[in-house]
């Protein structure tokens, strides 16, 4: 198993990519704290992992709240005995619209959750990663941070900040043997995607597919596979990688 004896915290783990990452991590031998503001969803994911013989616990957290982030990391450390991997995956979308029409409070929320929360989660996690001699931080950015499409300017900007922050974190934390990498998926039909485009019609799907050489959208399994690799010791010399999981979209 590729993550045997590793202890991971995954945020935004109640559905979509975070759910798939949590389940794959557990299947690869990790103990996983399934953290989300959706308490019921997180509990269901943790229960499914336990039912499959894996190690997991659910934790309810709002990643924009500093005290709750500290408590989340503490729950992993006291429940499982340490911390090796932090997956900053919680995120919120922007409904399709022109940048000048987006409300200020929506912009604030996008940046609070998609960018600023990493300060709170990571600051709480760092002493514990250091105590284990290093670790892996995996940030869910998006291909939107590297190749923005029209209609989601503030979301795109938050993911561009996420990519930049990943590089800065990697450069500052390397000396502590803490690797920092970003997942950059293309669109996938998770609940978040439905919040962006509304009802997913044939026309919407085809518009997205037209920009993807491999001819399909991403799946949570695609993202989870990449996350397992970045969390594992196979990736021990990878840091500062902004990894497209995009069927070739970034080539166009
Ligand atoms: N689905 C896509 O097309 C796509 C593409 C690229 C990147 N992403 C990114 O992937 C990540 C996961 O998204 P997803 O598509 O799996 O969507 P999702 O809606 O299935 O999952 C997002 C999760 O984040 C949680 N969350 C939101 N705000 C939170 C907060 N303040 N505190 C704690 N939890 C919070 C939600 O409850 C939800 O369970 C996000 O960062 C998203 O921006 C998604």
Image (tube, rainbow, N blue to C red):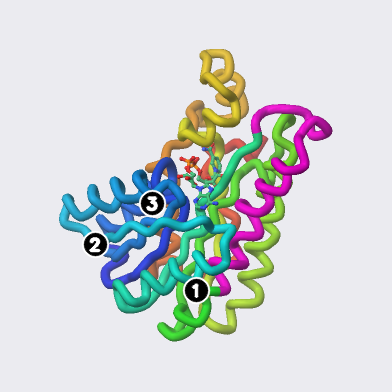
| Left or right of 152 on screen, residue 235 | left
Identify the residue shown where x is 23% and y is 50%. Answer: 47
Dot label at residue 125: 1
**Residue 23 image position (x, y, % from top left):** 31, 51
Identify residue for label 3: 21
Identify residue for label 2: 55
Q: Is residue 130 above or below residue 179?
A: below
Circle nearer the N terminus (1, 3): 3
Q: Please give the range of residues in magenta.
A: 95-123
Label 3 secondary element = helix
Mark 3 residue CB less than 8 A from any atom of ligand 1: no
Residue 30's image quarter?
A: bottom left
What whole-number distance in Å separates the C-alpha atoms at marks 3 and 2? Answer: 14 Å
Residue 101's image quarter?
A: top right
**Residue 77 image position (x, y, % from top left):** 37, 75
Identify the residue shown where x is 52% and y is 36%. Answer: 192
User: Decide: marks 1, 3 in contact (CB < 8 A)?
Assistant: no
Check residue 170 for magenta coloring. Answer: no
In the picture, which quadrant includes the C terminus?
top right
| Left or right of 64 on screen, residue 45 | left
């Amino acid at each position: 198993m590729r993550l045997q004896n590793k202890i991971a915290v995954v945020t935004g783990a109640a559905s979509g990519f975070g759910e798939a990452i949590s389940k794959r991590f557990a299947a690869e031998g990790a103990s996983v704290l399934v953290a989300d503001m959706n308490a019921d969803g997180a509990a269901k994911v943790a229960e499914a992992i336990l039912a499959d013989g894996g190690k997991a616990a659910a934790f309810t957290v709002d990643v924009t709240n500093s005290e709750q982030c500290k408590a989340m990391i503490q729950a992993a450390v006291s429940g499982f005995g340490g911390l090796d991997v932090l997956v900053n995956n919680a995120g919120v979308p922007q409904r399709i619209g022109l940048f000048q029409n987006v409300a200020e409070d929506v912009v604030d929320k996008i940046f609070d959750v998609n960018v600023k929360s990493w300060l709170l989660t990571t600051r709480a996690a760092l002493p514990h990663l250091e105590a284990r001699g290093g670790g892996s931080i995996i940030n869910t950015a998006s291909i939107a941070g590297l190749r923005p499409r029209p209609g989601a300017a503030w979301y795109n900007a938050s993911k561009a900040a996420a990519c930049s922050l990943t590089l800065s974190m990697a450069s500052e934390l390397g000396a502590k043997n803490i690797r920092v990498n970003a997942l950059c998926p293309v669109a996938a039909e998770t609940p978040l995607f439905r919040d962006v485009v509304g009802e997913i019609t044939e026309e919407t799907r085809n518009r997205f597919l037209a920009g993807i050489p491999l001819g399909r959208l991403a799946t949570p399994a695609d993202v989870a596979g990449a996350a397992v690799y970045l969390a594992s010791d196979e990736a021990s010399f990878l840091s500062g990688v902004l990894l497209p999981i995009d069927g070739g979209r970034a080539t166009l």
